Image: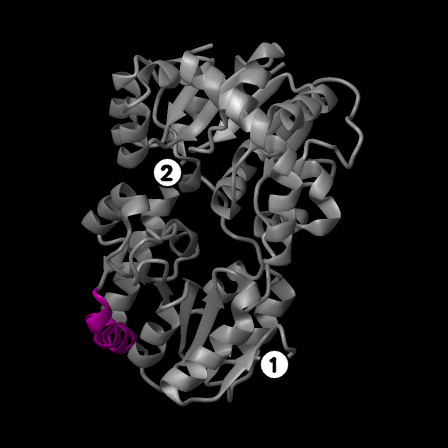
Amino acid sequence: MSLALALYRLGTGLFEPFAPLVLGARAGKGKEDPARMGERLGRASLPRPEGQLVWLHGVSVGETISLLTLIDRIRAERPGLSILVTSGTVTSAELLAKRLPAGVIHQYIPVDGPHAVARFMAHWKPDLAMLCESDLWPNLISAADASGAKLALVSARLTESSAKGWAKRPAAARDLLGRFDLILPQDEETVSRLKTFGMNPGPILNLKLLAAALPCDESELKRLKAVLKGRRIVVAASTHPGEEEIIATAVPPGPILIVIPRHPQRGDSVASTLAFSCGRAVERRAAGAPLDKNADVYVADTLGEMGLFLRLGDLVVLCGSFVPDIGGHNPLEPARLGTPTISGPFVHKNAELFATMGAVGAVEIVEPASLGARVSALLADRTAHDKLAKAGQAFADTQGTAFEEGWALITRLLP
């Protein structure tokens, strides 16, 4: 073990006794689940199934949902394997409770203290650990490696800032990354950065490009389509603080505006902000308000219904991109459903994907000041509207080939 990782282990061990206090404070802010706090300390709340077990980890909603493609493939081809999925956020846990297939176990990821990690590993004893994107916890990775488990980093993402940070501790980076038996990077930039640390990554695999279309309640979709027939609908998807004001003032009256907060617990404050900003009637789904033909502005602040509202929309305004620091969300989610999509300019977390899709007309980038005009133009110009929708769906439909090459390498690690 490198000196930097040894010092990290020592430091986290010294601070680990304070973890319950930190977690308790986070629980008070709604960032932890008080009923499952033990899992964050490595104390499992469920028994380990008999036999061999594959563990997959994604930090939050996007990463864990992208793992569903792998989970479905493992279950189809290796039904005898047990599967454990971990994540680190309350929202991801709530969504996975609805999306994980029966029999797949979810637990919260333990804090990266030596004792919490040891308890986690001693209980679950994974035969293969597959971590997604960039959630690299040194103690956890070291413990998994020491246990004899195979290690894979899938859809790996190493940002420029992360690479600069690791460059200050190159021995630690080589030590940690070198423990993986397989690294499948999600883009060429990550390939280049991994090579600077002496890694030899496998083929590119971006799981977020491969996920299945978001599910929905088909009976509710059919009902709402009948109820809303004749009304145009603009969906502002995954909004963050500061974006609701932009959306409210930009989207013109006429179509129904459906606003989906990225974090549903913000529903009440989002509704208040929208009402103040646009002076229009605002209703909330979580408060029981029906969505009908007379709706003006509707806040869809329930969990797991994104697929429903994306299907209802005539146009999607993909948020997380109209204010700095968020970095944009996945434009393939509405594209898979054939819904034309426009986004703001702050998309650095998905820059390559937006650039590639933009080059073939599969998504449009607009500045906040131009948002209202572009929304109105696309709603009025059916040809431009349909062209954007078809290009998005065509791009989404061509993304499956990369998975097979990556899957062939993953199967070599499966127990």
Viewer-nearest of discs 2 and 1:
1
- Name the side, left or right, on which 65 lies relative to 219: left
**Residue at position x 51%, y 80% from top?**
228
Seen at 48% across and 60% down, the residue is 262
Taking the image as shown, residue 203 lies to the left or right of residue 259, namely left
Q: Identity of the amino acid at label 1?
A: Pro
Residue bearing mark 2: 399
Q: Is 376 part of what is drawn in magenta?
A: yes
Q: Amino acid at mark 2?
A: Gln
Q: Picture quarter containing residue 22? A: top right
Locate residue 18 relative to residue 256 in the image: left or right. Answer: right
Residue 197 is situated, as x and y percent measured from the top left of the image, at 30, 16
Q: Is residue 415 above or below residue 105?
A: above
Q: Secondary structure at mark 1?
A: loop
- Towards the viewer: 13 or 49: 13
Q: Secondary structure at mark 2?
A: loop
Tell me if residue 107 can be seen. no
Real-space CA distance between mark 2 and mark 1, rounded to the nearest whole angstrom: 37 Å
Tell whether position 64 is magenta. Answer: no
* Segment colored magenta: 367-381
Q: Is 412 placed above or below 271 here?
A: above
Residue 235 rendering spot, x and y as whole percentages: 42, 69
Residue 299 position within the rendered picture, expressed as x and y whole percent measured from the top left: 51, 74
Quarter holding the C terminus? top right
Name the magenta segment's main secondary structure. Answer: helix
Crowding near pointer 1: few (<14 within 10 Å), some, many (20+)? some
Residue located at (23% from left, 59% from top): 365
Q: Residue at label 1?
A: 290
Most foreground residue, 128 or 391: 128
